Image (spheres, grey):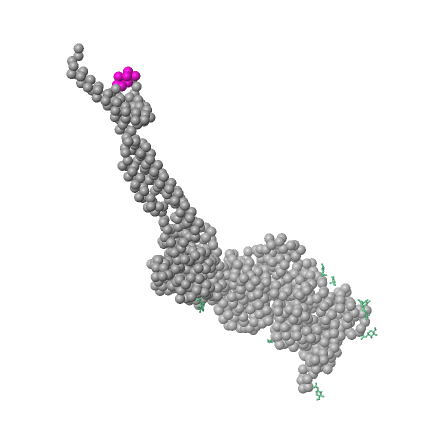
Amino acid sequence: MGSSSLLALWFCVTVTSAFLAASDNNTNSTSRPSEISIGALFTFNSYIGRAARLAIELAVHDVNTNSSILANTTLKLQVQDTNCSGFLGTIEALQLMEKQVVSIIGPQSSGIAHVISHAVNELHVPLLTFAATDPTLSSLQCPYLIRTTQSDYFQMNGIADLISNYGWREAIAIFVDDDYGRGGITALDDALATKRSKISYKAAFPPHADATMIKDVLVQINLMESRVYVVHVNPDSGLTIFSLAKSLGMMGSGYVWIASDWLASVLDSTYPPNFDTMNLIQGVIVFRQHTADSDLKRAFVTRWSQMVRSGNASSNLNTYALYAYDSVWLLAHAIDQFLLEGETFSFSDDPRLHDANGSSLHLTSLKYFDGGEQLRKKLLLTNFTGVTGQVQFDSEGNLIHPAYEILNIVGTGLRTLGFWSNYSGFSVVVPEVLYGESLNASTSNQLLYNAIWPGEITTKPRGWVFPNNGKPIRIGVPYRASYKEFISKDSSPDGVQGYCIDVFKAAINLLPYPVPYSFILFGDGIKNPNYNDLMEKVYENYFDAAVGDISIVTNRTRIVDFTQPYIESGLVIVAPVKERSSSPWAFLKPFSVQMWFSFSTMFFSHRENTVSTLGRFVLIIWLFVVLIINSSYTASLTSILTVQQLSSGIHGLDSLISSSDPIGYQVGSFAKNYMMEELNIAESRLVSLNNPKAYERALELGPKNGGVAAIVDEFAYVELFMSTNCKYRPVGQEFTKNGWGFAFPRDSPLAIDLSTAILTLSENGDLQRIHDKWLQHAGCSSQENEIDANRLSLRSFWGLFLICGLACLVALIVFFMRIFCQYRRYSTQDEDAKLEPERSLKRPPRLTSIKDLISFVDKKEEDVKNSIRQKLSHKQRQSGRIFNEQSTPPA
Ligand SMILES: *[C@@H]1O[C@H](CO)[C@@H](O)[C@H](O)[C@H]1NC(C)=O
Ligand SMILES: *[C@@H]1O[C@H](CO)[C@@H](O)[C@H](O)[C@H]1NC(C)=O
Ligand SMILES: *[C@@H]1O[C@H](CO)[C@@H](O)[C@H](O)[C@H]1NC(C)=O
Ligand SMILES: *[C@@H]1O[C@H](CO)[C@@H](O)[C@H](O)[C@H]1NC(C)=O
Ligand SMILES: *[C@@H]1O[C@H](CO)[C@@H](O)[C@H](O)[C@H]1NC(C)=O
Ligand SMILES: *[C@@H]1O[C@H](CO)[C@@H](O)[C@H](O)[C@H]1NC(C)=O
Ligand SMILES: *[C@@H]1O[C@H](CO)[C@@H](O)[C@H](O)[C@H]1NC(C)=O
Ligand SMILES: *[C@@H]1O[C@H](CO)[C@@H](O)[C@H](O)[C@H]1NC(C)=O
Ligand SMILES: *[C@@H]1O[C@H](CO)[C@@H](O)[C@H](O)[C@H]1NC(C)=O
């Protein structure tokens, strides 16, 4: 029937039963209606419509010629062309309902589906949409709209999985601004959010946008950071985007293009593949609804290709045509069931629809389908195997087993990278084999073949670029006035140096791509800059990033991203410790008088008995050593058992808050805000301190003399401060444990990569090396060293042991010298006396003298003295005799 006569019918109102195709005989299947009208609504001149039209016609033909389904009943197809217009589509849907069709195959467009869903909900005419994929067309809102294809909800989840699978955090959505485009991209946004990724920009254009409009959008997104584009547009205008993108150089390396199934429909529909078209879209990733392979499908495909060859088909087969074909079969099965139960097709007037006087819209011709509710139920319960596989609906009215093929455009063909299904995620095997398996077994299959990306590169694109292409990123560096080891100005080519700069450079060098950067000082160098202000600059994109000892910034979570902490740092309280005797020498003081007395007694005592004097001397020294060690240990034990006294009286956070003494903080540090806001310390108590010297002075003066009782600062600074000032130490626990890092604008992909690089640095020990280079100092660098210094050990008493040893040595030397002198005197006389017998024995004289010496030492002093005295007198006598002998001539 021609469209002109249909239009004439539309205006010819009173003929309400003209197309009452369904019989209203109230008997059972024995007298079925001979003809049942069904409608079809789509755009003839579209990629989907061309194929769908043929598929629907084939399906109606197949049903009508099949004796096992709807025998003795013919399906009569009424087709309407929506011609890509929501307005015409809506009117034509009403026209179809006026013709009292029992159901409509279509509409193709999600927009029309939204509008007429209200009408069909009232008139109870089920719609079988084989191409309206908008996820917001839910079965709850539109119960009479049955989607016989996959919802884009699943496709967008697949795309989101793909994006997060490749490690991209952001994507730009390019979509047509209608129900189909918006619904799909909203679903993508939601799906990405669950993967902690996001759509960084939604580039929408109207359905009939011209080339300039699309070009403007493309130029705009090309200036953005993300290089991952998801294209969700209509098949009939989508290729324009790629040709414009190609002309803008956006199809080269570094770009990622992901197209939803519209592109697959276009490519499937055109045969043979157009070389120019394929050339435009090299490296694009395409999603396509997956339909299970089966004999039925293969036979259908063969039949279709024969028709194409004989010129009976104007389009190649695409997936939507398969769904359209199955939709007709689904309807046939449902009608069969409907009739089997003895239901009839009858229509009645809707009392709410009446012809308003003076209106030529004859709305009364719209009839209410009495059996609509029953037919809808039958449709949702139908279970059969069609060319798309098993056709069955789940409890939410969606087709079961949503699955997609992931294709890569290479050369003139489509290469399958793998599959995505709602059930098993990614796999390189068809999802059908995985449905029965447990998910654990399928996780090992979660991979895809390698893609060839735009620009014919095989390595996965990074997915983002620095927004101001090519120009070095501007990094704000705090121009510190104190603690310059962390970061400070210098005359090197970078203009800055320090611990943080070295960490940053080491981390940047680990990144797999080059990052050009330049450092820009922030602050005047006289006073430490406020880091919140610095963060604000990063937020305002005045800086692309900020490097430095950027500690906890109160506003940080709101405005910027930080790298993972590379230094754990919290606030600590520093207070002076009471000066304690650092060496046990002090213990000598009280004993010195006594010692002096003993020494003098020793040296000025009678010389009678030297050995016992020396023994006493050594003993006295030993007694003192024991006394001192004993006293030291007692004192040490006492000091351990009693609370370590701090001169400031601040023992931790509680005493800090409760006291009213002034507290110091570092200029620009967040410690001030923290103390005021979190600890409720009055601002009047807080004293800003500029540098370590000021710290020292303030602590030295103390709270009474205009100084401070304690300082609250981050541990990293305190560590450095204490390395040169042993008089102060942290008290209590570290609080507000938190990290340091580099700041980046929110969601900057560089922050993630740099965090990974810093973790690598920390794992391979480079971080510690850089730390030691800048922040390691001699002296009492840490708390433990200080405690050690106050603890008594063997080493603490080396002086005492030295004195003791020296005393022993002196006593020994004195003893031996005495012995030696005595021996010499003794032996010279002895030798004279024993001259004769020794010669006769012929012994070596030295051996004798050593043996003699030992025996001499063995002798008691008294004996020696006596013998010397004896010998002396004997010698005198002998010398007298010799003299006599000499004087008297021999006889
Ligand atoms: C309905 O069926 C009855 C027999 O049960 C028959 O007499 C009658 O003609 C039928 N009506 C129509 C409209 O087919
Ligand atoms: C007819 O339909 C049934 C399903 O109802 C199917 O099994 C059969 O193959 C069909 N016959 C032909 C010739 O298509
Ligand atoms: C169809 O009609 C023929 C005769 O016209 C009849 O023999 C057959 O039983 C009918 N089939 C059904 C299912 O009503
Ligand atoms: C479809 O609409 C276009 C304009 O949008 C018009 O030029 C064309 O003639 C229409 N085709 C049909 C078959 O109505
Ligand atoms: C193509 O159409 C012609 C007539 O329109 C018909 O004779 C022929 O059988 C058809 N070919 C196929 C493969 O359906
Ligand atoms: C039609 O058949 C069904 C069973 O298939 C039966 O329940 C119903 O009563 C029958 N209706 C008539 C009007 O015969
Ligand atoms: C339409 O107008 C006629 C008189 O012209 C009046 O009798 C009738 O009630 C009107 N119907 C409605 C629905 O207003
Ligand atoms: C649907 O049919 C298939 C076989 O065609 C069967 O395995 C499955 O259990 C059926 N489902 C329901 C819910 O009846
Ligand atoms: C946080 O930011 C706001 C506005 O950007 C600013 O007014 C406020 O002072 C900041 N807070 C702190 C603690 O710096």
**Ligand 8 found in image quarter:** bottom right
User: Does the magenta stretch mainly form a helix, a strand or a loop?
Assistant: helix
Image check: 235 left or right of 735? right
Report if residue 839 lies within the magenta region. yes
| Relative image position of residue 51 (x, y in whole percent) | 64, 67
Q: Is residue 126 visible?
A: yes
Quadrant hosting residue 577: bottom left
Quadrant hosting residue 529: bottom left
Image check: 381 left or right of 205? right
Report if residue 736 lies within the magenta region. no
| Relative image position of residue 258 (x, y in whole percent) | 55, 63
Residue in the picture at 41% in, 55% down:
730
Which quadrant holds the C terminus? top left
Find the magenta span and give its range: 834-841
Image check: 552 left or right of 410? left
Foreground of the two, 463 or 451: 463
| Relative image position of residue 614 (x, y in whole percent) | 31, 34
The answer to whether 29 is drawn above or below residue 611 in the figure is below
Q: Residue furthest top?
A: 891
Q: Is residue 804 visible?
A: no
Residue in the picture at 64% in, 69% down:
138
Residue in the picture at 26% in, 28% down:
821
Foreground of the two, 237 or 343: 343
| Relative image position of residue 178 (x, y in whole percent) | 58, 72
Which quadrant holds the N terminus? bottom right
Residue in the picture at 38% in, 63% down:
688
The answer to whether 658 is drawn above or below residue 786 in the figure is below
